[in-house]
């Protein structure tokens, strides 16, 4: 174990089916969270399975987080969804970048179909289990939306609206939808300020008939359509379809006496239209891989300082923790979400690239799933090709970024139970929280 001073985090190493159908994109849902407080004694975070020295490291870690992090946002709401009695038997490994077919690790069946509602022949990849005794009406499914992001904010917004609608129409058991990181504009540091929106505060409740005002950067009130049209689409969809939406991320603009601050922000919205979590990316993507890629989010973005969790209710998925992309590389953050708040699912919208993606994208998801004995969900943008030299200025204005794609679902055993390739796809699977319970009881690393 070592101290990573650059990230003000202690890095401590913690040792620790589904058949498939392809069809169009869908929405990720979760329920709200019961009120809690971040403040707690260091002993309450001690992990019984650790040696004394490791416990001391984690106590120091909690002290650091207590100093650097604000209390997580907690909001509460009810839900009436039934639990499902799912089980897993079939597992998938990520397909190669040139393949559009899921590879079955165990006995699986895979079929493909295109959706007439999807403009780019999106594939929906459904994971189910023939041995699942739950009825169709009681399945609790999640959906990951992977789609190409363009330089047109309006086009991106319209695509998301259509994809969510089509996904729910075709898959009524989906309770939770996850969008990718930076889905309303280019993933480029210079583009973040241009595409940034003024987002509502935590706990905001959206009423589509009597829209509440949002304060803009000058303190002037305006509607969501004026200040945050991308966010409005998510709120509308969550209420319309009665689902949870983890809205990937968009750049957020905050005005203060010190000037304008830009964050990389994920909005988590309940079926009632309440903002139950608002996560600002904590660990900014500042890397310089020799012979690979150089990227520095801190050129325009500011790091967040909150942990983000929300409660979907015991009859759905329970507690859900949220990070964004680079946050997944820090196991301590994930451990705090699961050890402190008993999260059953960790969600990371992300946009890994062609250097780090092949090497670490699946590895990190499986590592966090095994570390924390929980489900891990990731949603990435689909890959786009660099524009031709004669493309219009609106397309070539910002540097092109090639996303790795491969949005995935990993179970508590560390197995990839749902994934796709780099193309536009939606990954859908039922999640059974008994798998989390059984894993934590069978291999006890939690207190």
Image (cartoon, helix red, strand yellow):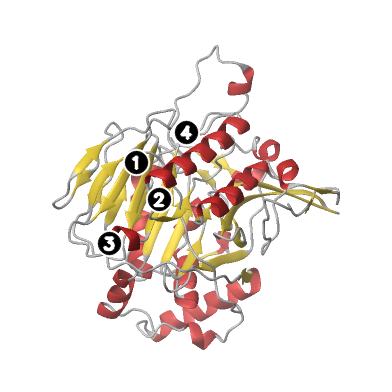
In x, y percent, where is residue 65? 59, 72
Q: Nearer the viewer, mark 4 or mark 2?
A: 2
Q: Quadrant of the C terminus?
A: bottom left
Choose the circle earlier in sequence order: 4 or 2: 2
Q: Circle 3 is placed at which residue position?
A: 135
Residue topped by disc 1: 124
- Taking depth in this image into account, of 385 and 145 the one nearest to the observer is 145
Q: Which residue is mark 2?
A: 143
Q: Is residue 368 visible?
A: no
| Circle nearer the N terminus (4, 3) | 3
- Which is in the foreground here, disc 3 or disc 1? 3
Q: Is residue 427 visible?
A: yes
Q: Mark 4: which secondary structure?
A: loop
Q: Residue at left 51%, top 81%?
A: 59
Residue 187 location (% of width, % of height): 56, 37
**Residue mark closest to the camera, 1 vs 4:** 1
**For marks 2 and 1 on the same chain, the one whose residue lies earlier in the sequence:** 1
Is 270 placed above or below 394 here?
A: below
Name the disc covering residue 148, or none.
Answer: 4
Question: In the figure, 137 relative to 419: above or below?
Answer: below
Mark 4 nearby-residue class (10 Å; few <14, some 14–19, many ≥20) = many
The Cα atoms of the two marked residues, 3 and 1, are separated by 21 Å
Quick one: 410 or 175, which is closer to the camera? 175
Classed neighbour count for the residue bearing mark 1: other residues with Cα under 10 Å, few (<14), some (14–19), many (≥20): many
Residue contact between numbered discs 3 and 2, judged by CB atoms under 8 Å: no
Q: What is the secondary structure assignment of the residue under circle 1?
A: strand
Q: Is residue 193 left or right of residue 307?
A: right
- Give the foreground label among 4 and 3: 3
Under tag 2, what secondary structure?
strand
């Amino acid at each position: 174990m070592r101290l990573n001073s650059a990230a003000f985090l202690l890095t401590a190493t913690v040792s620790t089916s589904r058949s498939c159908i392809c069809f169009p994109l869908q929405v990720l849902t979760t329920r709200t969270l019961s009120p809690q407080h971040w403040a707690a004694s260091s002993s309450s975070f001690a992990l019984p399975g650790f040696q004394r020295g490791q416990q001391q490291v984690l106590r120091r870690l909690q002290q650091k987080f207590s100093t650097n992090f604000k209390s997580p946002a907690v909001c509460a709401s009810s839900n009436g969804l039934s639990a499902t009695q799912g089980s897993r038997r079939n597992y998938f490994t990520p397909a190669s970048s040139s393949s559009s077919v899921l590879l079955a690790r165990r006995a699986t069946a895979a079929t493909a179909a295109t959706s007439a509602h999807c403009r780019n022949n999106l594939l929906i990849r459904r994971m189910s289990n023939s041995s699942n005794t739950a009825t169709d009406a009681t399945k609790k499914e999640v959906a990951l939306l992977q789609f190409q992001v363009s330089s047109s904010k309006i086009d991106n917004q319209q695509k998301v609206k259509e994809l969510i609608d089509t996904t729910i129409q075709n898959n009524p058991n989906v309770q939770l939808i996850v969008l990718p990181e930076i889905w309303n504009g280019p993933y480029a540091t210079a583009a973040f300020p241009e595409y940034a929106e003024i987002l509502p505060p935590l706990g905001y409740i959206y009423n589509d008939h009597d829209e509440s005002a949002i304060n803009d950067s000058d303190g002037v009130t305006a509607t969501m359509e004026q200040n945050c049209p991308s966010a409005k689409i998510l709120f509308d969809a969550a209420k319309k379809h009665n689902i949870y939406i983890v809205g990937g991320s968009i750049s957020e603009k905050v005005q203060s006496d010190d000037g304008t601050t830009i964050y990389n922000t994920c909005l988590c919205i309940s079926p009632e239209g309440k903002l139950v979590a608002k996560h600002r990316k904590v660990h900014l993507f500042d890397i310089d891989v020799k012979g690979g890629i150089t990227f520095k989010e801190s050129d325009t973005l500011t790091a967040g300082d909150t942990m983000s969790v929300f409660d979907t209710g015991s009859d759905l998925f329970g507690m859900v923790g949220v990070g964004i992309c680079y946050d997944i590389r820090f196991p301590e953050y994930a451990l705090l979400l699961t050890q402190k708040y008993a999260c059953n699912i960790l969600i990371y919208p992300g946009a890994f690239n062609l250097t780090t993606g092949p090497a670490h994208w699946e590895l990190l998801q499986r590592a966090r799933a095994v570390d924390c004995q929980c489900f891990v969900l990731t949603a990435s943008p689909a890959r786009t090709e660099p524009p031709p030299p004669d493309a219009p200025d609106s397309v070539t204005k910002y540097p092109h970024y090639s996303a790795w794609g491969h949005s995935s679902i990993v179970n508590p055993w560390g197995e990839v139970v749902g994934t796709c390739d780099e193309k536009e796809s939606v990954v859908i699977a039922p999640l059974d929280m008994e798998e989390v319970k059984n894993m934590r009881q069978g291999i006890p690393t939690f207190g």
